Image: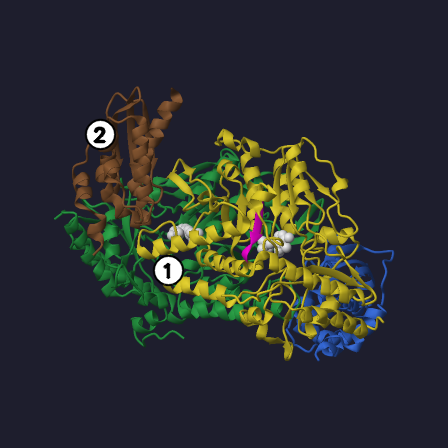
Chain colours: A yellow, B brown, C green, D blue
């Protein structure tokens, strides 16, 4: 499969050869330098092939049919779940396939609001009831996907949203908030998609448990980039997306501890999630099926399984080391450009591989345009973390983010591009 | 043709002439299980006497596999201790879920070994287990109430 | 692209050649006879290629990035929406991409329950408020996807579920229910996935409008199989899935009249659906973006666009004619097998191409097993329409369903297989 | 290199020295528009006198394109009738959304033609229109209140 070197570094020639898109050019013959994997990653041939093979030989509706194709498709779909479970240190039945991480977080939020309307529900759902006086805690650095669903949950239940604020180097400020006995949920990003700061998960879980709150981990920027064992972390829920981890779009995963998933009422309802349906009312299947209504993203789950194989063959510890090295190059080279300010930690302690920055006198959009003109794809804007940007008094940053296929040389081009942008806009 | 491997004569016999069918009094617990994919249903009653399974009676709506396996169940567990019945159940379940890998021990599950072929068809495993799970559930309920 | 014959029939050799899976064998060398397209259809090379081409050249996060790939990906994604809009006679902005039809129907149901909790909502959402006394009307032949979400909506709001019952030939019995001034929603399948009866949409819409109720059309079994113009039908909402129309899994479409989508509060919340986010609260983007939270099923939308191209090149009227012809063959050949009873209309008036039946003395599961052994893939069970089966006093039916790639010869094998099943089980 | 096509000298001039910047009194309506993808914002005030656009004043936080285009806006619409201003707006918008297909009529949109290159970059079109949409919205509000 993936060729990796015997010793430390990755065999980037072999890896890059697996990603067809990386050999294209943009903007009149510039080789593509793709530094936007934090938004979405690219896919290796192995993932594309696995999906195609599935579609050309086994495709059928899963968990429904009794013919051979249906058996094979169901086996492949469940095998993918099992592979992902191994990657994140969970049991397969603790993983629900969703369309993306956003759906996963919303699923948890709706479990609470659906439970808060008591008609027709069993006592096992009582632990999810929220009302005025209850508190949901997030942080100021959250992606909108781990903020807006909680705002809306508060609207629907009367609970209050509170948040940890952010330190000057872009970390969660643990001193900024005390949880209370009324804190019911603590939701936070494992790694910020802007500052790349890695959260002190153990401490946050400890505090949440001390007051009996449930934890929701936004693992969108951790599972794709570092070894993660959800059981060891001790969180109650976690969500991540396939498209950020070399897998297909249209598939994500929600992790929930079995005991919780078993107690939760359904979210999306329809086929395949039922136990018994009458016109007068229905009962529901056990998890994870209870939360997978309708024909699911079958080939996409299979593709995600192949992405897990690909990453595992490299080793998540080596993926992390590689990205930290790229972050180091980015931080070092950008440090030499006057007027560049990093938003986030400038050393590598508890830090992943995305680097966000502003350039004095040149707006992020304009920096991005100059980089794009040189073939370098970065993201500019608030990266769906608007409150974090407000916290730093800025509208937009430039963010470079990486994956296994990026080289130190590509990253070094970033600083050159920033210099060119400054020159172009006459900011010496 | 694999069909005969799956539908062994013993299965077809039980299907045509199910043993112990019908709902009988007295009983200690009644359960109703369904197979959510195909809508098959079984209502099953258990009568215990001390630790002995005194009677298992049932009414079922389902395919040959589910009907025959419930019939085989009654043959195997009636007259046995609960402990022994659960040992048989575990053995049958292990075989049924083995994807053809476990042949099943005839000394323990008797006619149940005929269902080894079914275990190769994952969509039918639930059929083979429908009555068995209803039985397990019923016994658990009796014990819980006691 | 697709080769079709100059005159009436489809060029099945060419069409079948487009579907790689159809040339495989099952159960020890039996050629695959795939009669389960009602559950999920197979995909032509053209769809697989379009998706792969997108992933190998343009893949990026849509509606977020400013670099060239992001522009191209956004263009492709929106071009797919525009193609689908042409197919179903709608405006692009009236179409929301969902993961499947089930999500689409749930989205509408949650728009109502979210509106029914009034805190923090504008007056435009008032038309979606439901409460005790209000009625939601469905039919007894609905797929669980168009039944359970309404049951749950009733649970959440206190509204009452009522339903049209079903005639002996498997059609909606229009005389079985009178709508009232309290009827707020009328939801029904365009074509039953079991009986294949086509609903009298115009009449149902007329009645709903007369009492001021909104209509929700489950178009899962119509859009893939016949010409459908949603604007002409006059329904308020409609939902369908990509995987049933030769497109990818993991993508579906919700249609909603602009005026309604504009007034609806969001369902899933997170990135890309916001206008402005502050910790204290957020405002939302106009539709369809408001309902597309998170990174969407990008390549799948592109694949669905290619499926629309494929179907349009054949012509939906010819697709329908072909499937009706296959239904005729199925009905004629099955009629000659003693003990076979069709569940659904036995003539072709207002009827699509799925044929469900029971065989006296042989359970559907057992019939299916014998068919599978002969390479014929059908669906057995209640097909997620359990109440319909109860209405006919049966637990399960055998259903054969078709698409453009099926031949009359394949369909004729069905009746032979049923005879074999009867013989095997000694039911002469 | 396409960069110079997009960032024409005129644009950079307006960006470095925006015309009409700052929020002024008196005004009839104030609007606040944001670009949801990048967080850019503009607060814009309009003062009408009869049917004449008497003043447009604004405060904006944004990239060179959005700043320059708002600056060009004030040059073009202040002193014009509302009808004329809207005709200019439509013409500018048509060009901006044309994906490089409409060059823009210099007689109508003056310095606005410099933004023809921007129209080839769909992600930047919203930047070019930010101030214009805020202006449109503000005028509509004045009219509605009247
Ligand atoms: C009539 C009907 N409605 C709804 C659905 C649900 O579609 P999906 O599972 O793709 O959401 C189906 C198919 O399963 C169907 O046939
Ligand atoms: C930290 C974080 N959380 C949540 C998300 C949302 O993921 P998705 O859009 O795939 O649902 C993202 C990425 O967009 C992210 O970076």
In which quadrant of the rendered image does the N terminus of chain B lie?
Answer: bottom left
- List the single residue furthest toward the right: D25
Which stretch appears magenta?
A238-242
In the figure, is residue A192 to the left or right of B47? right
Residue A8 in the figure: left or right of residue C175: right
Q: Nearer the viewer, mark 2 or mark 1?
A: 1
- The spot of residue B50 in percent (x, y) is 30, 19
Where does the image place residue D59, in percent across and percent down from the top left?
Answer: 82, 59
- Residue reaching furthest to the left: C428
Nearer to me, D11 or C264: D11
Where residue B112 appears, as percent x and y from the top left, is 24, 40
For label 1, being within 8 Å of ligand 1 is answered: no
For this view, does C89 lie left or right of residue C125? left
Dot 2 surroundings within 10 Å: few (below 14), some, or many (20 or more)?
some
The chief SS type of the magenta part is strand
Mark 1, Cα crowd under 10 Å, few <14 / some 14-19 / many 20+, is many
The subunit letter for the residue under badge 2 reads B
Q: Is residue A113 above or below residue A347?
A: above
Where residue D143 appears, x then y in whole percent?
Answer: 74, 56
Give the residue displayed 74% in from the left and 39% down from the top: A177
SS state under label 1:
loop
Q: Is mark 2 within 8 Å of ligand 1?
A: no
Q: Which residue is mark 2?
A: B22
Q: What separation in Å lies between label 2 and label 1 (alpha carbons)?
A: 41 Å
The chain under label 1 reads A
Does residue C183 belong to the magenta stretch? no
- The tag on residue D67 is none
- On the question of residue C43 being in view, the answer is yes
Under circle 2, the secondary element is loop
Task: Find disc 1 in the rendering and name its residue.
Answer: A58
Task: In the rendered view, tell whether residue A234 sits above or below residue C65.
Answer: above
In this view, the residue in front, A220 or C112, is A220
């Amino acid at each position: 499969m993936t060729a990796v070197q015997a010793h430390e570094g990755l065999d980037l020639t072999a890896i890059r050869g697996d990603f067809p898109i990386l050999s294209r050019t943009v903007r009149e013959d510039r080789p593509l330098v793709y530094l936007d994997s934090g938004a979405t990653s690219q896919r290796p041939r192995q993932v594309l092939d696995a999906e195609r093979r599935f579609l050309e030989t086994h495709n059928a509706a899963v968990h429904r049919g009794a013919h051979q194709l249906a058996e094979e498709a169901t086996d492949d779909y469940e095998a993918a779940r099992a592979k992902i479970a191994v990657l994140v240190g969970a049991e397969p039945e603790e993983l629900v396939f969703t369309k993306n991480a956003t759906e996963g977080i919303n699923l948890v939020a709706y479990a609470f609001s659906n439970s808060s309307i008591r008609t027709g529900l069993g006592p096992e759902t009582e632990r999810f009831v929220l009302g005025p006086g209850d508190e949901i805690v997030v942080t100021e650095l959250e992606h909108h996907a781990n903020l807006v669903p909680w705002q809306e949950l508060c609207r629907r239940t009367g609970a209050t949203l509170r948040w940890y604020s952010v330190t000057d180097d872009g970390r969660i400020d643990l001193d900024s908030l005390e949880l209370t006995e009324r804190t019911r949920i603590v939701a936070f990003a494992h790694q910020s998609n802007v500052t790349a700061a890695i959260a002190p998960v153990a401490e946050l879980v400890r505090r949440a448990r001390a007051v009996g709150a449930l934890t929701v981990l936004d693992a969108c920027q951790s599972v794709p980039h570092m070894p993660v064992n959800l059981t060891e972390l001790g969180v109650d829920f976690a969500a991540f997306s396939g498209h950020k981890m070399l897998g297909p779009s249209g598939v994500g995963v929600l992790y929930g501890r079995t005991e919780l998933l078993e107690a939760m009422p359904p979210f999306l309802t329809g086929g395949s999630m039922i136990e018994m349906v009458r016109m007068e009312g229905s009962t529901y299947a056990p998890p994870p099926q209870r939360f997978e209504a309708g024909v699911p993203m079958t080939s996409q789950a299979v593709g995600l399984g192949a992405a897990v194989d690909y990453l595992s063959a490299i080793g998540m510890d080596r993926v992390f080391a590689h990205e930290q090295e790229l972050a180091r190059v980015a931080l070092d080279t950008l440090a030499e450009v006057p007027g560049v300010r990093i938003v986030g930690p400038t050393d590598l302690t508890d830090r992943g591989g995305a680097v966000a920055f502003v350039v004095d006198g040149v707006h992020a959009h304009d920096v991005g345009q100059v980089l794009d003109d040189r073939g370098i794809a970065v993201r500019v804007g608030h990266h769906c973390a608007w409150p974090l940007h407000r916290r730093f008094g800025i509208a937009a940053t430039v963010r470079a983010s990486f994956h296994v296929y990026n080289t130190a040389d590509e990253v070094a081009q970033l600083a050159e591009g920033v210099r060119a942008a400054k020159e172009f806009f006459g900011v010496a | 043709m694999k069909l005969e491997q799956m539908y062994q004569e013993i299965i077809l016999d039980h299907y045509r002439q199910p043993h112990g069918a019908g709902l009988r009094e007295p009983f200690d617990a009644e359960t109703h299980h369904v197979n959510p994919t195909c809508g098959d249903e079984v209502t099953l009653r258990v009568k215990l006497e001390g630790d002995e399974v005194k009677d298992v009676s049932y009414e079922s709506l389902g395919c040959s596999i589910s009907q025959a396996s419930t019939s085989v169940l009654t043959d195997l567990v009636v007259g046995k201790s609960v402990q022994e019945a659960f040992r048989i159940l575990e053995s049958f379940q292990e075989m049924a879920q083995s994807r053809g890998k476990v042949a099943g021990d005839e000394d323990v599950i008797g006619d149940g070994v005929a269902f080894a072929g079914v275990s190769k068809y994952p969509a039918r495993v639930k059929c083979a287990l429908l009555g068995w799970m209803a039985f397990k559930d019923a016994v658990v309920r009796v014990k819980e109430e006691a």
